[in-house]
Amino acid sequence: MLAFIIRRLGQALLVLMAVGFVSFSMFKFMGDPLENMLGQEATVADRAELEERLGLNDPIIVQYFDFFERALRGDFGVSYRVGLPVGEVILDRLPATLELAFLSGVFAISLGFVLGVYTAIKRDGFLANFIMTTSLIGVSLPTFLIGVFLIWAFSVNLGWLPSFGRGETRSVFGVDLAIFTWDGLRSMILPAVTLGLYQMTLIMRLVRSEMLEVLRTDYIRFARARGLSQRTVNFGHAMKNTLVPVITVTGLQFGSIVAFAIITESVFQWPGVGLLFINAVSFVDIPVMSAYLLLVGVIFVTINLIVDLLYFTIDPRLSVSSN
Amino acid sequence: MSTETQKGAEARPEFKEVVTTSTWQRWMHSDIWHSYKRSPVIIVSSLTFLVLVLGAVLSPLISPYTPFDPASLNLMNGFTKPMSANEFTGDYFLLGTDDQGRDVLSTILFGLRISLFVGVVAVLFAMTLGVVLGLVSGYVGGWVDGMIMRIADIQMTFPSIMVAMLLYGIGKGLIPPDLRDEMAIWVLIISIGLSEWVQFARTVRGATMVERQKEYVQAGNLIGLSRWSIMLRHILPNVTGPILVIATISLALAIIAEATLSFLGVGAPKTEPSLGTLINVGRQYILSGEWWILLFPSLTLLALALSVNLFGDWLRDILNPKLR
């Protein structure tokens, strides 16, 4: 098991180094920060002064190590677009994305799990078949279209929920969160559903197929033969054994949620890092893009690592076979 | 599903009586055609796709108006309702007009053209890149294989739509600002293409490693054929099945990726709007009640993505002998 952990850590480090390299190259070789930051009336002296201040005169290898050293301190330079330190801008926007991702994750897991178990138990039921067919269409729908139509239905036609923005926020330990206010929670419902819908269908289909597989096994048949109630067999014995693959996929999906938040945040004008990134892309704001890439890289690698390590705690068979 | 395939198997004996002469006859008696005839969903979706492609290709000929020619636009036509004539000018619009008086049907046809063009070219690009890298990786092996596959692994860590966005940003940054709008379509194609090559490379690599062990490859080696000749002329034809399946699935993904990027304003420029751009324009008018500007482009995109997706699923099932 130790060898496995070391190997996985090595791989994670490799991915991070590669991502860091791309991030640094973008930062270093693309665009001209001076051109972007100085106005048209800038003098040669202004130029030289800024060049020196940004450290653009140092040798490349020094800049490369500087980049990593500064990245560790959370210093990613100054955004071309808003003129503020990138680290601050991202830190300011991160809570909004994380709470949105959290809520949509909760939505995807809980509903996906319930529907998955339901469709597996009532395999040939009318409602179960209906859910399965609808989910197939749902998977082919682009995320942004789901968002736009939810706005059309629930904000424009029914007027139940707000169509954009984050609503009221409340400061919790110095972090502004919307999830603890009624107004903020209402603003979060549509974006969270949009973001979580795809993951929900994925989890549902996975739970269903795992559940069907388990229900065919001998120990389930034996449990039925012992005369245990349907409920005990379905929930006590069968459902428990579907957990391993579900946790894996769910964990890995959290990364995708962060990535797809770019689209959802843009549709709902949710002020998170995703919206920041897409604005950075359209304005070619390199420091923000490269910092975002590094941030997402760290998030993805961490999640993958945690999921891999979780295998061992959840499934005792794995640690036995590796010893 | 399983009962259907069994029926197919029972019907098969008559195949022996068929003397295969022309390619057409062989095609008419093939399993693929047989399965095609039996699934109404696939017939409908492939016909839908065909109609959409024809609409896109023939758009300059069949669209009732020229939506991107400023000279022919009349602002008085703005916000005309679908299936009605404009109250000021008397012009008739089947699907209504947008804020600038452009005919929605015509913009959809031209938008479809751009969406399909970007999707198809991006997939061709991804396919070429992925197939070549996959062949080299699987056939040559060693450190070349290791390097290509590590790059693929790292790229696979991130969702392809995010990779495409990032590449679009990088590409835009590399182009001088005054050329950005002109080159936007090509930047879009290259970013989407680069974000989708991994699937092709992985599949082709796997298939190549199997093929490499076979006698015909050894024979080719023996008579002194070059590596490239063996890879491209002998191995490649034997791994086309999976490539075709991935190409169809990638096409659906590429179309959606293109629409998403354009919708977010980091894709096709306003001067050459694709379906995604049109949906983005339409979104601005849902609050004021002009629903048709949003609805019709969305339905077109949906029909396109769904028909390609269903067709891809069917193709995967039919070309995969394990599932039959």
Image (tube, coloured by chain):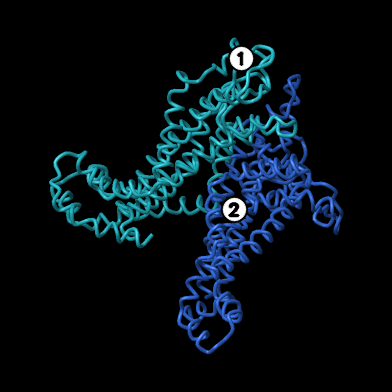
Chain colours: A blue, B cyan
Q: Which residue is mark 1?
A: B91
Q: Are marks 2 and 1 in contact (CB under 8 Å)?
A: no
The vertical placement of B219 against B126, above or below, is: below
Gap between marks 2 and 1 measured at Cα = 42 Å
Q: Can the viewer see residue A210 in this picture?
A: yes
On residue B123, the disc is: none
Residue type highlighted by circle 2: Tyr
Q: Is residue B236 above or below residue A46?
A: below
In the displayed image of the protein, which residue is found farthest to the bottom? A226
Amino acid tagged 1: Asp
Q: Dot 2 falls on which chain?
A: A
The one nearer the camera, B169 or A9, is B169
Label 2: how many residues lie within 10 Å, few (<14), some (14-19) or many (20+)?
many
Q: Rate crowding at label 1 as few (under 14), some (14 to 19) or many (20 or more) other CA atoms within 10 Å.
A: few
Find residue B300 and report its horizontal and vertical position in percent: 53, 35
Label 1's element?
loop
Q: Is residue B304 left or right of residue A73?
A: left
**Can you tell which of label 2 and label 1 is closer to the viewer?**
1
Vertical side of A106 occupied by B89: above or below = above
Q: Secondary structure under badge 2?
A: helix
- The residue depicted at 58 percent of the width and 76 percent of the height is A240
Taking depth in this image into account, of A61 and A248 the one nearest to the observer is A248
In this rendering, position of residue B117 left or right of residue B275: left
Asked which quadrant contains residue B81, the reply is top right
Can you see residue A276? no
Say which residue label 2 marks. Answer: A198
